[in-house]
Amino acid sequence: MKEHDLTLGEELRRQGISRRSFLKFCAGVASSMAIPAAMVPAMAESLAQARRQPAIMMAYQECTGCLESLTRSFAPTVENLIFNFISLDFQHALQAASGDQAVDAIKTSMKENWGKYLLLVDGSIPLNDDGIYSVSHGQSHLDSLRELAEGAAAIVSIGTCASYGGIGAASPNPTGAVGVDQIITDKPILNVPGCPPMPEVMTGVYTSFLAFGALPEVDSLKRPKAFFGDTIHDRCYRRTFYDQGKFADSFDDEGARNGWCLYKLGCKGPITHNACATLKFNEGVSWPIQSGHGCIGCSEPNFWDKEGFYKPLSAGQWGSAEGIAAAAAAGVALGAASAVMSRRNQNKISGGK
Amino acid sequence: MSDTSVTEIELDYESKRLSVRKPEERFDVQGDMSDDERVEKAMVNFAKDFGRVAATYMEACIHCGACAHACPFYEASGDPRHTPIWKLEPFKQAYKREAGPLAFMYKTLNLKPKVTVDELKDWQELLYDTCTLCGRCTLICPMSIDIATLVGMARHGMFHAGLVPHELYTVTEKAQKEGSPLGATPSVFEDRIEWMGDEHEVEMNVNEDQADVLVLMSSIEIQKYPESMAATAKILNHMGKSWTFRTDGYEATNFGMLSGNTGWQKDMSMKVISTAEKIGAKVVILPECGHAYQAMRWQGANMYGKPLPFEVQHISEFLASAVESGDLKLKTVNKSVAFHDPCQVSRRGGATPAPRKVLEALGVELREAESGGNLNFCCGGGGGVITIHRADTLRYKIMANKFRQLDATGAEMMVTSCSNCRQNFDESGEKLNWGKDMNSLLELVAENLVEEGKR
Amino acid sequence: MTLLDFARGPAMQIAIIIFVVGIVWRLVGVWALPKKKDLSEPRQKGAWVGGLKGLFVHAWPYKPFVPKVGAQYIIGYIIHLGLFIVLIFGTPHMLFFADIVGFTWWTLPGGVITAVAVVTTLALFVALIRRLVNPVHRLISNFDDYATWFVTTAPFVTGLMTTMNMWPDYETGLAIHLLSVWLLLIYFPFGKLMHSFWFVVSRYTTGSRFARRGGMA
Ligand code: HEM
Ligand code: HEM
Ligand code: SF4
Ligand code: SF4
Ligand code: SF4
Ligand code: SF4
């Protein structure tokens, strides 16, 4: 397999991609990741020297939406190439092999690249009943993850499910699904949440891993700060309407047609950290808020469980309202009791009458 | 201090203000009780008053401090302790600890500590010397808290704890024992009626068995302004009323109420009520005395335990209805007049329009003082304060404010319809060289009756 | 569960339950105390009309008192109106209540709300300073007065900090804002914030008592 030995630079040249467009790409990635422009040539240099990075991509309890998002690139872009440059030794949906053959491929790759490979995970991992709810080739995903993680240099959790449990973990979470970092604690882990995650984020992460040999700086939820530092609300093009108090009251009213803020319709932009407000999906064509729907907070833990996507952010999460009626009743009881007590006390100290 | 020594303390007849002589040694604590007993007594009697109304008021205060600026005492002294609501601090503390809805919490966590005897002693001055129960603070309070009523309640506990100022206690005990706080015993009363009858050549009705109108007098009038007896008699005779004075029920003042002994307050009121019942009175006329009006008109029925079987009128109300009905015709007095409203009759009594009707009938030019009428600034002598020598300095200061306000009207003549206010004006006027007299509305009317046929 | 989820969910529920229990408790506790009937002959009928009037007459001081307490009342009005405007006409706040009552209403632009909130916060600080400096206020103030001030001011400050993005991150800021509001609700029934209920009871009581007497209160 000769191709495997080429550096990224050689590969690019082989594909006929000019140095100029490569530099442009590097500048783009650098700016999206807040890497100083002065570092771009050095970054390009080290990137060109990079060798193929062995990687294993495991799909656990998932919907394949993440993969769809990552592979939906139509033009032969540099991004594509970067993806392709990663030596995906296992991805069950993409590879031709299946069954024992496929499992062997993993085993081989693990052995060859022990301690060096990147483990990419999408999908959550069920914990209930020893993880029996999600099994491939006779092995529970829980065991699979533990095994693969052991020899990994680092783990990237792709999508909200792998990061935080996602829809699998949504209430009532019958399978006890969790994200990778709830199970593996002794490896560098990077979360790229989003439902689906943004391909550009993946590119950026791979690129910087290739160039610098390490995962980028992360926030408290292990997300690369470069992409998840701002909230949707911070970057939203509808923000001026928020500030002016101009809101759409329904999806088909005047406000909605004028492109006003979607806060009243339940937009979770203010508490959602993601990059779609600036990078957009489908190569910058559009993104959810641009198409008229509020942010549902897809890159945040438990975004399914905030009492509905259309409930405004400032509205409370009530569970049930019975508590209030019970509280009023309890108040009456306590009040009456305290009055009885104080009447009795009054009688006691004032000796009756 | 034994009971006899109290009543033996001499009254001070020389002063224009009638009280006991300035004591050489003060006895501001009565009875032989241990400190614990005192506190307990105070609590027992505080607790009796913790009903819904008092509780509402004590819950409602937001500590905004506005009330300070309405109180004549704070205005005169600038002492923050004279802030009306502060005067109630131990009472409030006891309420919160013993009776409020959260009492349980306050008590178990000791958030509101038990009231101590030292606190009660400290508060004697605040509850007695520096509150006339004038109710002006209620006007300014954003929560409309009736502090005067609460101070009246707090005095109940103080009395039973034996913590009444010397002079006030003395006169109260005199009143309970002798029928008058200021030496106007029934025999003194009878003598003075006779004297006034002779002096003014008016027919006096005394101890009639039956009469429509029972006339009361206050000790201050009997002793210091006996002309009011003559004036009242003259007017009632002139109107041809069936009326009488009664030696078994004449004293209008109620020091039981002022000092805080509800039992005595009831005794004092019941004397009058049973006399009125006995003679079949339809109307009881209260003299020119502010707190007497409060005691009988508004608290009388509550002492009696049922509605009173007669009507209660302040003399100014009686005169007002007489001039309105045309039963009484008055000569025109060509003078400008400033009227000092007695708090208990006007603001807290509701009879504010009455004296104005009478003054209108007299044809005087009424010049209302700044903050007059219901907003009137108290003279600083009511609520028993005038009896207390300790309170004199502050009382004069209040009066200085009062004089300024009245002088500012430029009126030629000063009139009021409370003899307690009047003696305060006269005494303080002498002290501060005011140079004016305070006149009685009643006497002014009596002097200006239009005799039938003469005109 | 994140801090924000905690604040929006369980913390809110607990706070509201304490709020409701506490208020009912305190109101019923006073209402159920004995009340003596006033047997005196009323001067006039319709004490309840006086009671209703009584709710309003003390909304502004009588003329002779204006020079003394007018400024204090103005500060008071700024605080309460500011509170009202921010709470009722701020969009996020409206949506909170709309979620409960089931309908929405017109709101003010964020900038206006921010300005009102800043003025209100300043007024609260003026009130605090007055309380600390004025001898009358200093004397009569107790823990409750300062606690009340704190729990009222905290949501203003945290709300403004949230709007102005002054927290390390927005969610935490919002969560802190909400928690400060729940603190207000929890403290409410136990301190003088209950004046928002007592003022009705107390003013009505005095208004009706003095309506049957005449006079003035
Ligand atoms: C009932 C529960 C409440 C909820 C759910 C709530 C929620 C919010 C939210 C979501 C914001 C928006 C922040 C932003 O613009 O980014 C906010 C702002 C604010 N809140 Fe609240 N809040 C509540 C109660 C209160 C209370 C009781 C107060 C005051 C005592 C208060 C004072 C403020 C202030 C001053 C702001 C800043 C408003 C601005 O400048 O636009 N909030 N609140
Ligand atoms: C709706 C009925 C309410 C009425 C009629 C009312 C009335 C008042 C009044 C008259 C004052 C005294 C102002 C002064 O110092 O002159 C006051 C103070 C205050 N009120 Fe209210 N209030 C109401 C509701 C509220 C609510 C809902 C809150 C808070 C959540 C609140 C918070 C405060 C605070 C913190 C103070 C004290 C300011 C200081 O420390 O001086 N009020 N209120
Ligand atoms: S649409 Fe959502 S993200 Fe955009 S300004 Fe409105 S609330 Fe913020
Ligand atoms: S707008 Fe919100 S919900 Fe939609 S993709 Fe972006 S982060 Fe996810
Ligand atoms: S009733 Fe009059 S004297 Fe007493 S505290 Fe109030 S204003 Fe002052
Ligand atoms: S004016 Fe009323 S509310 Fe204010 S401190 Fe005085 S009693 Fe309390």
Image (tube, helix red, strand yellow):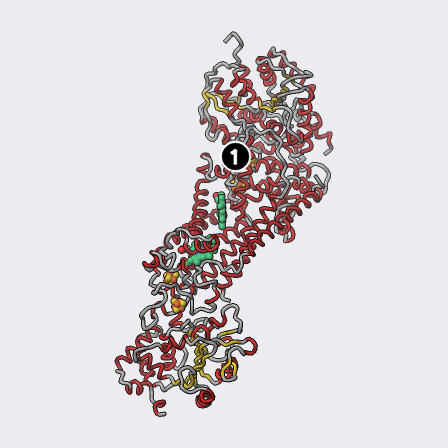
Asked if residue A323 is positioned above or below residue B374 in the image, the reply reads below
Q: Quadrant of ligand 3?
A: bottom left
* Residue B384 left/right relative to A38: right
Which residue is at 47% across, 71% downward? A167
The chain ID associated with circle 1 is C
Which residue is at 62% across, 52% downward? B105
Query: Would you name the residue on which mark 1 appears?
Result: C50
Q: Position of residue B291 (x, y in %)?
A: 60, 28
* Residue A144 left/right relative to C113: right
Quadrant (top left/top right/bottom left/bottom right) for the C terminus of chain A = top right
Image quadrant where residue B290 sits: top right
Depth check: A267 or C85 in front? A267
Quadrant (top left/top right/bottom left/bottom right) for the N terminus of chain A = bottom left
The single residue placed furthest to the top in the displayed view is B453
Q: Is mark 1 within 8 Å of ligand 2?
A: no
* Residue A28 left/right relative to B209: left
Specify whether residue B150 is in view: yes
Asked if residue C38 is positioned above or below residue B105 in the image, the reply reads above
Which residue is at 48% across, 80% downward? A187
